Image: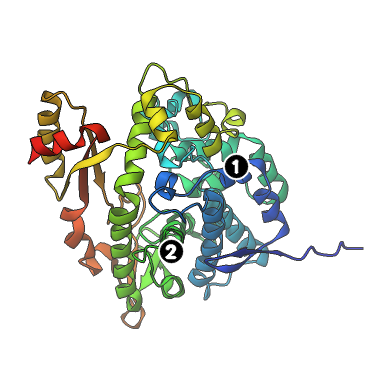
Amino acid sequence: MDRPSIPPMEIRDPIHGAITVDQPESCVIEHPFVQRLRGIRQLGFSHLPFPGATHTRFNHSLGVMHLAGRAFDTCFRDKPFATREAKRAFRHCLRLAGLCHDLGHAPFSHAAEFAMPTLRALNVRCYDPDKVAHRLDERASHEDYTVAILTQSSLADTIRTHFVFAPEHVAQLVSHEVLVVDDFFVHQGYDIRFLLAQLISSDLDADRLDYLVRDSYFTGASYGQTDVDWLVSNMARHVDEAGRVSLALDKRALFAFDDFMISRFHMFVMVYFHQKSLAYEEMLKLYMQTPQCSYELPSDLEEYRKTDDAQMMAHLRGSENEWARRIVEFDPVKVVYQVQGPEADTNLEHRRQILEAAGIQAISAPGHGVVYGQRKPGFPPLYVVERSRQHAEPVDQATVIFDRYQDERCVGRLYVRNEDRQRAQELLS
């Protein structure tokens, strides 16, 4: 007698409403490495200037999983798969990539990445050696940790137990450096890996579509509001001359795409590069560079699982270092000079030297808002399609939005201790 099927569960989300999760997916959600994301704020120190921004990487990851599934359904709405099982496997693989894409984030999200070990020490075994050889002795990234957790921790066993694909397939949608030698993503003669990977990381991915709206909601800033439903409902697929299936957008949603890209730029400038949150990031960096700092992010994955915002704050509270004390006592450095535009880095360095010559320690913090991300090596572009004419062109040829904003993406600041602020302003006036 067949077992009765377990009905899907629903997770209530303030952005997307009810997020439906089936039983195999819930086993991954409940895994300790995924649950760890509850302890890492999505926006690092941004809850200090934006008190409502206490949402976590866990919230965001559920949202990305949900949007990735919706995007899959739209892109393949007119594409019959050979079997229901094949369609379910691809959809599951994509949704898990969305759920797990941020597993490797350090405490306070990006703020502590400079405390990570080298890629060689992390020893990610599923990478293509030719693609990573040049950076083995460079600092690992949160994406490297994500791939390692997906393929080399107990989470990998959970994925193997509940799904027909391997954790390496999920990891390959997160990182193009993962080497998978089988043809899992080839279906009926077409390789759909490019499209699925673009739904996780591209100029129109589920990651950005979730975090812009979510971060806007929790910070109270209106800049990130964009028409997610319209963009998702107009997603499509395109097959290029090389037979690669890639992500496309119907031309009728191009204005919504432009608005989405502008919203992203404004969120970088007004929220992600807020002067107060960046001040705390810079102080954390200064602390990490001092001899008194004993904090390290471990290469051992089980030890890494124990790291989160609370663990790092507990460490900082136990330190007598000036920068650690300023963080825990909410005494940040202050902005004494700000500049925007392509010459921001040069202007910052000139004024930093003026202050340093006067005996004032000046902290230079250039910030670059990204309008157009770099395409992954070997990947096709995002296309804009006009179905009535059977016409397709790369998105950077279909819109001028990228060229228009390229020269305005740098906002640079100089910080000094609060007690040095007045004198610094006099020197720079």
Q: Which residue carries the number 1 mark?
A: 36
Helix, strand or loop under label 2: helix
Q: Residue at 68% of width from left, 40% of height from top?
A: 157
Q: Position of residue 331 (x, y in %)?
A: 36, 36
- Position of residue 18 relative to residue 126, above or below, is below
Amino acid at the residue labelled 2: Val
Q: Residue at 15% of width from left, 44% of height from top?
A: 344
Residue 104 showing in the rendered view: yes
- Position of residue 415 relative to residue 373, above or below, is above
Q: Position of residue 266 (x, y in %)?
A: 29, 60
Q: Residues within 10 Å of mark 1 (few under 14, many from 20)?
A: many
> CB of mark 2 within 8 Å of CB of mark 1?
no
Amino acid at the residue labelled 1: Arg
Q: Residues within 10 Å of mark 2 (few under 14, many from 20)?
A: many
Residue 372 showing in the rendered view: no
Mark on residue 378?
Answer: none
Work out whether mark 2 precedes mark 1 in sequence or the reverse, and give the earlier one: 1
- Position of residue 189 relative to residue 340, above or below, is below
Q: Which residue carries the number 2 mark?
A: 213
Split into 4 quadrants, where in the image is the C terminus? top left
Q: Is residue 32 left or right of residue 293?
A: right
Helix, strand or loop under label 1: helix
Q: Position of residue 284 (x, y in %)?
A: 38, 32
Residue at the farthest bottom position: 388
Q: Position of residue 164 (x, y in %)?
A: 67, 51
Split into 4 quadrants, where in the image is the N terminus? bottom right
Q: Quadrant of residue 139?
A: top left
Q: Quadrant of residue 277?
A: top left
- Position of residue 192 relative to residue 364, above or below, is below
